Amino acid sequence: MIDWLDEDTLEFPPTARALGPDSEAPGLLAAGGLLSPERLEAAYRRGIFPWYGPGQPPLWWAPDPRMVLQTAHFKLSRSLRKTLQRFIRTPGCEIRINHDRAAVLRACADTPREGQDGTWIVPELQAAYLAWPALHSVETWMDGELAGGLYGVNLGRMFYGESMFMRRTDASKIALAALICLCREFEIPWIDCQQNTRHLASLGAAEVSRNAFESHLAAHTGQATPGPWTYHPALWRHLQL
């Protein structure tokens, strides 16, 4: 059984009560509660995130293990290095930060996901994230068009990656590489990736236990939040391009 959250409280049950690996929904912790920036922040500081589909109540998750990309361990392939070098010197190609967060969320919601029917980035979830100042988008622009990007949440020295999309080849990878540079600039050591996928593993992400993840959050989310979240071409020095 999982807890049903009261609409008037920001409290969550202990994450140790999340459903185990042998259940039909490993990591599911609770359901219900109104979505708001305040509730989202209370959740993320505990390592909890919402994930649910149209017609469902909010479902809150705290999986064990947790997929994490340590920014120092990012794997820059030879092909991506060449792509970045070409992107940087091509007129009309640029990285923008928080230029159009709403468009990024909509594009991520519209992107089909393998093994998923529909989207979990439902309109009420988009509205709650967009009202939250901790939300950031990293956007790949080509010839005046949004070609790809990602969005996530920054609390202290922690970044929580949420979703990405691309409309042109490698545009989402370019945005991720820019995020790595920003995190290294801001001394943010971990990016939360939530679930294990082969794609994330190929970029250097690896699983950590829920206890290790929560210990990291306790040590880093309370630190001063870095900024400003702006892009400058000099940031690419962090990848030695």
Image (cartoon, rainbow, N blue to C red):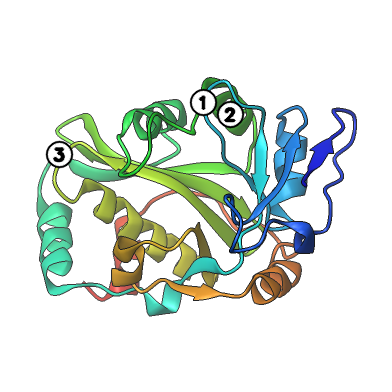
Which residue is identified by label 3?
92
Which residue is identified by label 1?
122
Towards the viewer: 168 or 187: 168
Query: Callout 3, which amino acid?
Result: Gly
In the rendered structure, the answer to whether residue 185 lies left or right of residue 115 reads right
- Give the answer, above or below, for where 142 lies relative to 189: above
Towards the viewer: 42 or 185: 42
- Which residue appears at 77% of the width and 37% of the height? 38
Image location (x, y in percent) of residue 130:
57, 29
Category of crowding for the residue at label 2, using alpha-carbon neighbours closer than 10 angstroms: few (below 14), some (14–19), many (at least 20): some
Q: Mark 3 or mark 1: which comes first in sequence?
A: 3
- Which residue appears at 27% of the width and 48% of the height? 172
Q: Mark 2 or mark 3: which comes first in sequence?
A: 3
- Give the answer, above or below, for where 179 lies relative to 169: below
Query: Callout 1, which amino acid?
Result: Val
- Which residue appears at 65% of the width and 35% of the height? 132
Towards the viewer: 226 or 173: 173
- Give the answer, above or below, for where 55 lies relative to 111: above
> Cα distance, mark 3 to mark 1?
32 Å
Query: Callout 2, which amino acid?
Result: Leu
Q: How many marks?
A: 3
Image location (x, y in percent) of residue 236:
30, 65
Which residue is identified by label 2?
125
Helix, strand or loop at mark 1: loop
- Marks 1 and 2: in contact by CB < 8 Å? yes
Image location (x, y in percent) of residue 167:
20, 36
Category of crowding for the residue at label 1, using alpha-carbon neighbours closer than 10 angstroms: few (below 14), some (14–19), many (at least 20): some
In the rendered structure, the answer to whether residue 177 lies left or right of residue 184 reads left
Task: Say if residue 61 shows up in the picture.
Answer: yes
Task: Say if residue 234 shows up in the picture.
Answer: no
> Cα distance, mark 2 to mark 1?
5 Å
Front: mark 3 or 1? 1
